[in-house]
Amino acid sequence: MTKQILVVEEVAELLRVDKQRIYELVRTNQLPVIRLGERQYRFSAQAIEEFLQGGGTRKESGRDAAY
């Protein structure tokens, strides 16, 4: 089974960037994120795939409210 939810380290590996860059993208609302409290983030594998397919830009949709 493919993972549906990713953690910061996994997203950083997929994007080939440092974890701090992922946190920066989250802070600036450039990366779709699921917030679990103030400091815990999870990422939908599907949303990250769409982010990559869109050339690294976040799609605006009604679904974004869940992130």
Image (cartoon, rainbow, N blue to C red):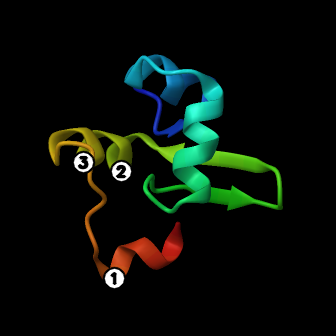
CB atoms of marks 3 and 1 within 8 Å: no
SS at circle 2: helix
Three-letter amino acid code at disc 2? Ala
Of label 3 and label 1, which has the lower sequence position? 3
Q: Is residue 64 left or right of residue 11?
A: left
* Residue 46 appears in the figure: yes
Q: Dot 1: within a 10 Å radius of its alpha carbon, few (fewer than 14), some, or many (20 or more) residues?
A: few
CB atoms of marks 2 and 3 within 8 Å: yes
Return the x and y of residue 39 as percentages of the image width and height.
82, 51
Residue at figure coordinates x 28%, y 47% from the top left: 51
Which residue is label 2 attached to? 47
Which residue is label 1 attached to? 62
Return the x and y of residue 21 as percentages of the image width and height.
56, 34
Residue at figure coordinates x 54%, y 60% from the top left: 28
Return the x and y of residue 12 as percentages of the image width and height.
52, 25
Which residue is label 3 attached to? 50
Three-letter amino acid code at disc 1? Gly
Q: How many marks?
A: 3
